[in-house]
Image (cartoon, rainbow, N blue to C red):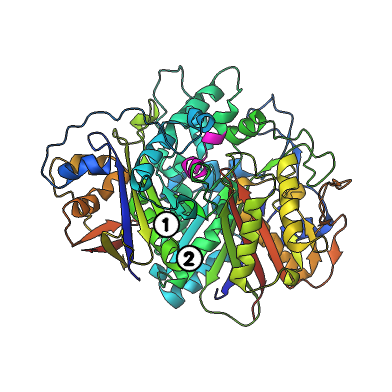
Amino acid sequence: MKPVYIDAVGLAAPGLSCWGAARAVLAGEAMLKPEPLARYRPQLLAANERRRATHIIRLAFQAGEDAVLDKDIELNKLAAVFATSGGDLDIIDSLCRVFSGPDRAVSPTQFHNSVHNSAAGYWSIGTGSQAPSSSLCACNYTFAAGLLEAVMFATVEVMPTLLVVYNISAPPPMREKVPGNTPFSMALLLSPQKTERSCARLTLKLVTGVCDESEALSAELDPMRKDNPAAKAIPLLELLARKMSGSLMFNTTSQQFIEVNMMQC
Amino acid sequence: MNPLQITNYTLLTALGAGVEANWQGLNAGESALHPCEFYDIADLHTWVGEVDGLDEVVIGREFSKFDCRNNRLALQGLKQDGFIGSVQQAKSRYGGDRVGVFIGTSTSGIHQTERAYLARQNEHAALPGWYHYEETQNTYSVAEFVRLYTGCEGVSVAISTACSSSAKVFASAYRAIHLGLCDAAIVGGVDSLCLTTLYGFDSLQLLSDEPCRPSDRFRNGISIGEAAGFALLQRFPEAGGFSLLGYGESSDAFHMSSPHPDGEGAYLAMQAALHSAGMEAEQIDYINLHGTATVANDLAEGVAVSRLFGNKTPCSSTKGWTGHTLGAAGIVEIVFSLLSLKHGLMPCSLNTQQVDSDIGINILMKSHSQPVKIVLSNSFGFGGNNVSLIIGETV
């Protein structure tokens, strides 16, 4: 596949509350202090949309806004790929509780927020972008599938494309059925051509077979990588933070994987 | 774009099991909608397009963890119209790892989660042992089920952009084939009835209390349906048959559950589809509308269509037959559009009695038999996610 370029990075996870603050931890220069994320206030949303935004929408916005705000990026020109495994598990739990009760009246806002593409919808409203946006899922392979889709989109449609991969943990009683305790969200702005903002060049190769997925360089970050499908991005973020080139591997299904070659630029 | 051959296709809706049964229903002009008796619902006065017999489907021991209404619907769909045979041919021709799987769904197997919660003795109890989250509730579960059942080992993803999901998969599969990641792809959509969408659309006051009446002066909302549909796309053209000729995608950037009143996003998607097909608006013979029968959708879509096509191009929504099958609507209406091409039929806007005078486009009040060469199909979803697809004869 043709290479694409990383023009911006965003991050939101416990102890990694934004890309700027997380770089030292990802570079192995500072210890991880896994403090819970504070409730994020999306800056791109008007008051009424912000009020309706749920935890998962705020988490997706936190990484997305971290990547692109205050950088002179034309937000209304960006295409977007939003990738999450579980979607809004809080709302799914809440709706299912309502259906188990005597009165099945659900909140209309909760229902429209229940769709898998909720964050993508709010993002297009917030940025005013009428460019295409997709929302996808590949369960535990969601990070790799999202990266592949975003690279394909940027390459074929020749548009700057924002990838946001994000996942929250499930509330009880679903938590026993859905592994993962840590919220994690990351964003990459991918460009089909090199720009003055480009920090790295990504070349993807799809391979048949199963790989041993890339682990975190930092042993203290590896438990987080294993805990959340979105956090499989950590090894890629570490290379970016360390300004290193390298090759990474991520399974896209149980039968194929991608080799990701990253060159600093 | 380079056209993609549509090698085979199949469809399971309330109207019928298989392409022929759906064609018979479409040709007969008989709606498949019935008053809602789904599961234990007693307090919703609405009509649904429910697929019969799903409770009796046996999914097989090998896939027992995947057992839920949505995957049963997928299984029954895959077994029709020699679809598996066509997939096997593609696998032999290209290799199993060169055949991708792209499935659209809005709610996947959420009904299984609803049932698991209902099975609890009290609100603090654990979910039952028979509930398997990853294989039923997770949005990817239906794509993984299709992938494992067909033995396709290529690129695979579930796309979930609400009611445009199974139109979106065509664009995604095109990009993967174009870039050489695979040579063929199963694209499709599966969405099944559940409490979430029935009570959810009711909460938005978007459920009609009668069979839905797209573009009608007195339309008052949707009827929800369920469906599974699949198409096999291939890189290399074959003699005859039909192809995907163009696609267009856009966002409204307006509201989560209401369309842009001027149909701005719909206009951009249709314009992009024409551009990708290298076509002018005049070349489209028939438009299969998204046409949900909500007041806002049909008005906004009408504005967008008239701005791009004027008021001559024949248009209709086929949701009066099947109901709005949500995440499966894209594939349902592509298969209906393929039937239009194959049989030379432009279906009427079923259940429509008097067209809304504010919808200034050519809504077909009667089905027309005449040659159809190029069809444009619209699918729009919550979050303002729009897709238009163009299909026609393989050149």
Q: Which quadrant holds the C terminus of chain A? A: bottom left
* Lateral position of residue A66 relative to residue B176, left or right: left
Of A102 and B170, the residue lying toward us: B170
Give coordinates of residue B6: x percent, y percent: 59, 70
Q: Which mark is residue A161?
A: 1
Q: Label 2: which residue?
A: A157
Q: Are marks 1 and 2 in contact (CB under 8 Å)?
A: yes
* Magenta region: A112-123
> Would residue A119 be counted in the magenta stretch?
yes
Q: Nearer the viewer, residue B81 or B227?
A: B227
Q: Residue at x 52, y 50 (%)?
A: A129
Q: Residue placed at 81% from the left, 56% from the top? A: B361
Distance between the Cα atoms at labels 1 and 2? Answer: 9 Å
* Residue A146 rendering spot, x and y as whole percentages: 39, 53
Q: Residues within 10 Å of mark 2 (few under 14, many from 20)?
A: some
In the picture, the disc for residue B10 is none
Residue B143 in view, yes or no: no
> In this rendering, does residue A84 appear at all?
yes
- Mark 1: amino acid: Thr
Image spot of residue B34 (x, y percent): 76, 39
